Every structure is written in structure tokens, then in C-alpha cells.
Image: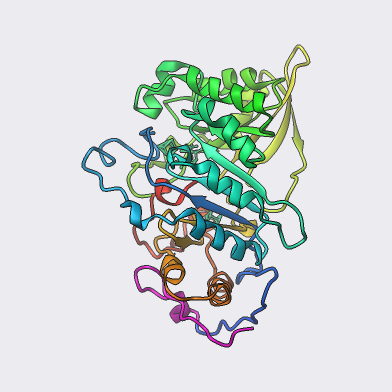
């Protein structure tokens, strides 16, 4: 094991170790790493672009992400080789699942080449990586076959309603529902499985879509997940009274369907799952992601890698840890592994839990990073 330690220094120079000087965790060459709350690192979300062709009002509001908005220059983006090198290092420390996201990941040119490289990585116990991708579905009909052939296992598609007027109000670029549904159908046809559909629910906007969306996906094998509208980033003007609590969604669905809670399949799962049966016996499954009303920080095993190689330990963080400089310097894999162990070993993020208790946020009140930059 290398004796050389690289000082921990996130992007803006703020060092968490300065505030937690007593943390000196044992380092291991390979193997699971645990944070200060004993949470392992299992899930890596990689943002492959900060660009998107939608302007969802809750994520990239048009007023901010307008024609003058400065996206990252191409030279700042991690290359596919850099991403793959980092992915292997993360997998050596316990990551079993990688999700490609963005921005809109299907806008990244030749994304299938990256999928091909990542799909060859084996986990510590010798299994295939659980490799997935979250997309707005706009380019899915065109790309589903390429993605599947490159080695993508499964996919999550975001869709906030079946009513065109409501969906267009939310995506804010006049994009029709039919093209997303076409993408989902194509993903099914090529065998991406399971397919999940994410629906962000915002009060006063798409509450009416909860039942039609549930009914539409019943019997299809596709799992619909309702996501509470989150206070992520600093641009969406989030207000608590626009959040539809999962409990309210359950109440709405309970009047039309027979709902039964289903056990979670993996530790750290974000959704509470329910089986759903309608009056004619048609069955399906839904998930509720209660990020606001029922924080799941205690089991949070997710890290996020931004498009330009900043590592974020929480969706609500303000600071990332610069891995690109290491990649583009002369750091060995072992040095980067040491760095990763130090970063994860010092992690104490639990933003949503503290928000739920009205305590000061774990980011110390700094401006939070945008979701389109680090990925959902
Ligand atoms: N562009 C892709 C998409 O929309 O699927 C991937 C990136 S997007 C940031 C990932 C997920 O985050 C989407 O399912 C989106 O609906 C969700 N999301 C974005 N902003 C959100 C917010 N403020 N609250 C809850 N979910 C949000
Ligand atoms: Fe784009 Fe996804 Fe954000 Fe919508 S949620 S603006 S599709 S990145
Ligand atoms: Fe994980 Fe941060 Fe979300 Fe808590 S708030 S579940 S620590 S990403």
C-alpha cells in the first residue's frame, strides 16, 4: 500500500478535515469503505453532461438556464477513459451500481462507447456492475438499441404526466408526451429491463396525473416512481407548500387501488415500494421517493461525480472534491484510491434528515450545487 497521502481539498479550498481533525481511518488497498456513520459506498452517479434539451421548471428554469448560460467547455468534461478509470477505482472500494445521468445523458456524443467500457467492470465479488441510466426519454427511441447492445442493463425514464399541456408546462420546451412514450416502448422492445419511470409531483401542477400515470403503467412491468419535489440547487424557487408528500399520493391512489407494501430489495434503496391492483385485477408496482418528508440519509450509500470530475457526497452539497486534477496530474490509481478513502471516510452528510428536524443544513448554508450539474 502506498505511504503517500494526498491532502484532502475540495474544489473551493474548504477542507472538511479541518473541522473533523480526529478522523484517521485505517486505509485498505481494496475493499469496502465506510463513512463516519458507517455507511458504505455502493452507488455512484456519474453526470456525463451539464446540458439538457428540456427546461423542467423544477430543475433548469428557463430564466436561469437561458441562451447566455455558460455550460462547461468540452475540455473540462471527463473523457470516457477518465470516467472508466475512476469507475474502476470506485468499484474497488465497494461500488456495485453506476447510474449515468446529467443534464441529459443521451446528449453526450457516443455515450454507448462509455457504456461499453463500464459494462466490462466487475464488482469486488466478481459480479457484473448494475449499470443504468436516467434519461428524459427524448432521444430514447433512437438510441435504445445502441444502449442495450453496448451493455446497458436497465433504464429509468422521467415523465411527469400523460397530459400534453401539463407535461409541456413542466418541460417548458413544448416536448410532447408521445415521444417519451415511444422511447419507453422502444426500451421495452430491445429488452432493457427493468424500466422505471420517474414522476416529480408538484402541487398545483401535475397532481391530476397521479392516477392516469398509475393506470397507464399497470400491467406493463414498468415501475412508476413518484418523487417529492426537492429543494435541490439554488434556482428552482422551491417552496415547501409545493411539495406533495408521499402520504398524500398514497391517499389518492388508495381510493382507486388495492395497495400493499413490498419489501425493499437492497439496502439504501430510495423508494418505498407498493404493489398495486386495480378493480379489474390488473397489477403493477409503484415506488414513493420521499426525499423531503421521510429522509433516507441513514442508509445513503450514494456518491456523485460531476461532469468535470468533482466528487459530491450529497445531493445537497455545496462543495465537491476535485478528482480531475489527480487524473490529469501524475497520480497513480493507488494515490487516487487513498484520496477516495479519506474523502468517504470523513463523510458526515445528512442534509435531508437535518432539514426534517429544522436543523442547520449540513452544507453550512452555502449555495447548493445544481442537480443538472451533478445528476439526480
Ligand atoms: N435529464 C435526465 C432526466 O430528467 O431523467 C437525467 C437528469 S435529471 C436531473 C434526474 C432526475 O432528477 C429526473 O428524474 C428528474 O425528474 C429529477 N429531478 C430534477 N430536479 C428535481 C427536483 N427539484 N426534485 C425532485 N426531482 C428532481
Ligand atoms: Fe433536463 Fe432532466 Fe433537469 Fe429536466 S430534470 S431539465 S430533463 S436534466
Ligand atoms: Fe444522501 Fe444527502 Fe440525500 Fe441524505 S440528503 S439521502 S445524505 S444525498
- How does the figure colour the protein chain or chains? rainbow
Q: Position of residue 91 (x, y in %)?
A: 64, 61
Over which residues does the magenta segment extend?
A: 1-20
Query: Could you tell me if residue 4 is visible in this image?
Result: yes
Taking the image as four quarters, which one is ligand 2 found in? Answer: top left
| Image-based side of 27 in relation to 199, left or right | right
| Residue 292, visible in the rendered structure | no
Depth check, front residue: 333 or 294: 333
Residue 274 appears at what percent x and percent y? 71, 33
Classify residue 19 as left or right of residue 29. left
Number of marks in the image?
Answer: 0
Residue 25 in the image: state x and y as whole percent: 62, 81
Q: Is residue 19 magenta?
A: yes
123 vs 205, left or right, is right
Q: Is residue 284 magenta?
A: no
Q: Nearer the viewer, residue 374 or 75?
A: 75
Q: Nearer the viewer, residue 313 or 287?
A: 313
Residue 301 lies in what quarter of the image?
Answer: bottom right
Residue name at image x 42 percent, y 53 percent: 307
What residue is at 66 percent from the left and 66 percent from the top? 92
Q: Is residue 178 above or below residue 313?
A: above
Left or right: 145 in relation to 73:
right
Amino acid at each position: 500500500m502506498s505511504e503517500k497521502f494526498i491532502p484532502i481539498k475540495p474544489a473551493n479550498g474548504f477542507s472538511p478535515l479541518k473541522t473533523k481533525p480526529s478522523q484517521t481511518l485505517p486505509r485498505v488497498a481494496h475493499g469496502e469503505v465506510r463513512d463516519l456513520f458507517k455507511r458504505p459506498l455502493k452507488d455512484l452517479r456519474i453526470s456525463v453532461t451539464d446540458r439538457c434539451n428540456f427546461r423542467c421548471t423544477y430543475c433548469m428554469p428557463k430564466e436561469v438556464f437561458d441562451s447566455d448560460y455558460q455550460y462547461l467547455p468540452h475540455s473540462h468534461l471527463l473523457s470516457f477513459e477518465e470516467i472508466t478509470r475512476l469507475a474502476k477505482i470506485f468499484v474497488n472500494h465497494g461500488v456495485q451500481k453506476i447510474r449515468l445521468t446529467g443534464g441529459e445523458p443521451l446528449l453526450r456524443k457516443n455515450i454507448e462507447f462509455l457504456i461499453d467500457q463500464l459494462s466490462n467492470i466487475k464488482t469486488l465479488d466478481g459480479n457484473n456492475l448494475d449499470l443504468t441510466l436516467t434519461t428524459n426519454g427524448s432521444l430514447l427511441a433512437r438510441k435504445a438499441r445502441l444502449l442495450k447492445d453496448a451493455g446497458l442493463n436497465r433504464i429509468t425514464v422521467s415523465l411527469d404526466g400523460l397530459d400534453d399541456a401539463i407535461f409541456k408546462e413542466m418541460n417548458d420546451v413544448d416536448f410532447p408526451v408521445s415521444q417519451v412514450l415511444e422511447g419507453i416502448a422502444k426500451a421495452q422492445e430491445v429488452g432493457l429491463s427493468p424500466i422505471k419511470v420517474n414522476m416529480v409531483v408538484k402541487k398545483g401542477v401535475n397532481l391530476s396525473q397521479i392516477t392516469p400515470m398509475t393506470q397507464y403503467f399497470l400491467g406493463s412491468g414498468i415501475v412508476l416512481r413518484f418523487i417529492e419535489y426537492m429543494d435541490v440547487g439554488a434556482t428552482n424557487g422551491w417552496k415547501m407548500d409545493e411539495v406533495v408528500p408521499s402520504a398524500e399520493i398514497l391517499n389518492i391512489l388508495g381510493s382507486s387501488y388495492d395497495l400493499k407494501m413490498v419489501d425493499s430489495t437492497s439496502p439504501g434503496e430510495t423508494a418505498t415500494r407498493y404493489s398495486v391492483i386495480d378493480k379489474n385485477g390488473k397489477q403493477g408496482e409503484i415506488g414513493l421517493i420521499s426525499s423531503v418528508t421521510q429522509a433516507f440519509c441513514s442508509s445513503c450509500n450514494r456518491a456523485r461525480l460531476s461532469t468535470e470530475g468533482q466528487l459530491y457526497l450529497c445531493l445537497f452539497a455545496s462543495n465537491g472534491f476535485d478528482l480531475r486534477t489527480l487524473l490529469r496530474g501524475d497520480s497513480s490509481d493507488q494515490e487516487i484510491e487513498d484520496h477516495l478513502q479519506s474523502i468517504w471516510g470523513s463523510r458526515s452528510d445528512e442534509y435531508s434528515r437535518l432539514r426534517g428536524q429544522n436543523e442547520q443544513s449540513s452544507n453550512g448554508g452555502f449555495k447548493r450545487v445544481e442537480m443538472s450539474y451533478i445528476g439526480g
